[in-house]
Amino acid sequence: MKIVLLLFMIINFSFATEHRVIVSGFTKHEHSHSSDGEEFNEENWGAGYEFTDFKEYGKLYFAGNFTVLKDSYSDAQFTLSASPNLRYKIYGDFDASFGIAAFLMWKKDTYKSGVSSDEAEYGLVPGLAPLASLYYQRFSVNLAYVPTIKMGSIDVVGFGIVYFGWKFN
């Protein structure tokens, strides 16, 4: 999975038509505290780089990004993501896109029930998230949503994350 995602990112980057600097901003969790009582950090400041091979409205295109930010427990998180997207012209200089991101995070694995952020160790954590983006000229606002998942020892509190982009090419 890791190798496939990395190859996808390299190939996609070589055909990129758009490049953006991105700044992560904030999240909103479905609950204010984790299952072990820790309050979530909802100011996930960080930065990254995004590229796409967007060429035509209404046609499938691919995007990839790399970000470094503070996670829900204020620990460092490194994320690599790739997503298929569709973009539509709304009106004038306004566009909107929708997609689904497959991502791989290097972060403290706090998704196991009963493991606090102090006890958690860094590891690779995969995921999927639906995406929506609004574009105005060079500026973009992007939203991703990770749903609540409770399955066996896995306990993920759902959250939405917002980040901002600036196209520089």
Image: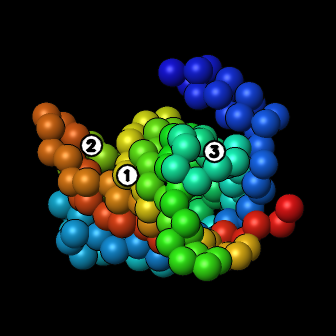
Q: Position of residue 123 (x, y in %)?
A: 49, 37
**Numbered label attached to residue 112:** 2
For image coordinates 54% across by 41% down, the residue present is 60
Compared with residue 73, is residue 100 higher up or lower down, i.e. above or below?
above
- Left or right? Give the position of 91 relative to 166: left
Q: Tag 1: residue type?
A: Pro
The Cα atoms of the two marked residues, 3 and 1, are separated by 14 Å
Compared with residue 128, is residue 46 higher up or lower down, i.e. above or below?
below
The Cα atoms of the two marked residues, 2 and 3, are separated by 27 Å
- Mark 3, other Cα within 10 Å: few <14 / some 14–19 / many ≥20: many
**Numbered label attached to residue 59:** none
Res. 99 in view: yes
Q: Position of residue 160 (x, y in %)?
A: 36, 66
Q: Position of residue 79 (x, y in %)?
A: 57, 48
Q: Secondary structure at mark 1?
A: strand
Q: Which residue is mark 3?
A: 64
- Mark 1, other Cα within 10 Å: few <14 / some 14–19 / many ≥20: some
Q: Tag 3: residue type?
A: Gly
Depth check: 139 or 112 in front?
139
Q: Position of residue 126 (x, y in %)?
A: 43, 37
For image coordinates 59% across by 63% down, the residue present is 69
Mark 3 or mark 1: name the one nearer the start of the chain: 3
Q: Which residue is mark 1?
A: 130
Q: Which image quadrant for residue 15? A: top right
For image coordinates 77% across by 56% down, the residue present is 19
Quadrant of the snapshot with the C terminus: bottom right
Q: Tag 2: residue type?
A: Lys
Q: Secondary structure at mark 2?
A: loop
Depth check: 55 or 112 in front?
55
Residue at the extreme right: 169
For image coordinates 29% across by 70% down, the residue present is 29
| Comparing labels 2 and 3, the label whose residue is closer to the camera | 3
